[in-house]
Image (cartoon, rainbow, N blue to C red):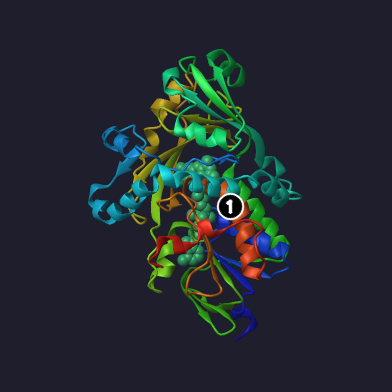
Amino acid sequence: MSEDERLGHAVVGAGIVGICTALSLQERGKQVTLIDPSPPAEQASYGNAGVISTWSCVPQSMPGLWKNVPKWLLDPEGPVSLRWSYLPTFLPWMLKFFAAGREDRIPAISDALLQLHRPTVDIYRQHLAGTGHEDLVRDSMYVFVYRDPAKLNLENLEWRLRRERGVPLEQIDAKSLADVEPDISTDYKAAVLIKGQGRAYDPGAIGKALAEKFEKQGGKLLQARVMALKPVEGGVELQTDQGTKIADKAVLAAGPWSAKLLKSHGLKVPLEAERGYHIVFTDPGVTLNNSIMVTDSKFVASSMASGIRCAGTAEFAGLDHPPDYRRAHVLAGPAKRLLPNLNTEAREVWMGQRPSFPDTLPAIGEVPGLPGIIAAFGHGHTGLTGAPMTGRIAAMLAVGETPNIDVSAYSLKRFGNT
Ligand SMILES: Cc1cc2nc3c(=O)[nH]c(=O)nc-3n(C[C@H](O)[C@H](O)[C@H](O)COP(=O)(O)OP(=O)(O)OC[C@H]3O[C@@H](n4cnc5c(N)ncnc54)[C@H](O)[C@@H]3O)c2cc1C
């Protein structure tokens, strides 16, 4: 085998998870190749809402959530949509999703999310140090805004989970909200501030800055699609559209495409492409100082390099179905209700696919039955947040170090059929 075909450690997928993993492997002295058919951070890692949610610990599936689903599906501005012909494929995942929302399962999921998310801002800052792009991660609060104050109840399970885990919260009224965010409509009568977080000023640019650092430090970017991978004597064989390569170890970080690469080994992992959209108002005329969660419409608004970005919605239509950009444009109505002086004329829209498991947790750890192949995918709504710690854990496992936290909650074994 020629030098060209030996990769050192391979990371499959140059989204934010793969990029952070590649940097953490370099920190451990490894020669690393990052493989992706696209340039770094072009998929979900490009267009997300930019919340670097240090305190994120509330699972997506919560008790009683299913009761809202019919109403959401019928509302064109609602946060969830489904391509009906996709329902038979989607149904098993949906049932697992609702099962994960049983009250007795929530605390363990919540703890596992928090331990992955807590160090995120610190690790991002370490990774960005020396790149000249340090200001892409900014200090921020996460501001949950409510039009109807009666809907804000800190005794609800969602807020109890946070309070019980020491999340620094403050409930404020409309007057204080106007001090924090002067451009938000006075129709919003109450808010909760989650303090001590970060936000991305341009999520895609963070990925690109870190990939550039990776290359400057001697890492290789290989523009190729991995078609199959399997353990072999002395490493992992990767079949790519640029030929067959051998890696010492391989980290699978191909976001929602990861499951396809495990299928040929008979592994069925319940990974769904949970499609989200954004709309950016590129000449907004207003500013936000923090990440804003608009609780009635369930999207996030934030000032970014390109303008005011509103991002959210969950669309279940399958990985390969073309985008339906009406899902993005529909956010203009609630955005204007949030920010009455927002100029909504100049806009850009985008679709990205969250890699989502039914229980909100990602898969991190050696793939059962495939020695040398380490999973690092499935971060759903919080992959920008979970990427730095995931990268660190995946790199530790790849080099045979033992992580100093319990990582069993992220094992693919939890799905039983792997
Ligand atoms: C609308 C929206 C808003 C969001 N908001 C937030 C937020 O505010 N905060 C937060 O923390 N998270 C947020 N997320 C989630 C976050 O964006 C994702 O969880 C995260 O980007 C996933 O990163 P990734 O690296 O796993 O996947 P991706 O970014 O999808 O990268 C996967 C990479 O794998 C590559 N790939 C695929 N197949 C192959 C193959 N066969 N061979 C080689 N490479 C391959 C792809 O080309 C791609 O580059 C949001 C997501 C969406 C859609």
From this viewpoint, is residue 258 visible? no
Query: Viewer-proximal residue, 85 or 123?
Result: 123
Going by the image, does 153 lie left or right of 63? right
Q: Is residue 13 left or right of residue 127?
A: left
Crowdedness near tag 1: few (<14), some (14–19) or many (≥20) residues, C-alpha within 10 Å: many
Asked whether 113 or 305 is in front, the reply is 113
Image label count: 1
Q: Residue at x 61, y 27 (%)?
A: 289
Residue depicted at 50% across the width and 19% down the height: 190
Q: Which residue is mark 1?
A: 387
Residue 412 screen position, x and y as percent: 46, 62
Residue 337 vertical position relative to residue 396 in the rendered view, above or below:
above
Q: On the image, which quarter does residue 114 sit in?
A: top right
Quadrant housing the N terminus? bottom right
Which residue is drawn at the image coordinates 67% and 48% (left, top)? 124
Residue that appears at 62% across and 75% down: 7
Q: For this view, does 183 lie left or right of residue 151? A: right
- Where does residue 85 sit, x and y in percent of width and height? 23, 51
Judged left or right of residue 363, residue 266 is: left
**Residue at the far right in the pictured view:** 130
Q: Position of residue 323 (x, y in %)?
A: 36, 47
Q: Nearer the viewer, residue 212 or 87?
A: 87
Figure check: 359 above or below 220: above
Label 1 sits on what residue type? Ala
Does residue 359 appear in the picture of this structure? yes
Q: Is residue 248 above or below residue 40?
A: below
Q: Position of residue 284 (x, y in %)?
A: 52, 27
Callout 1: CB less than 8 Å from ligand 1: yes
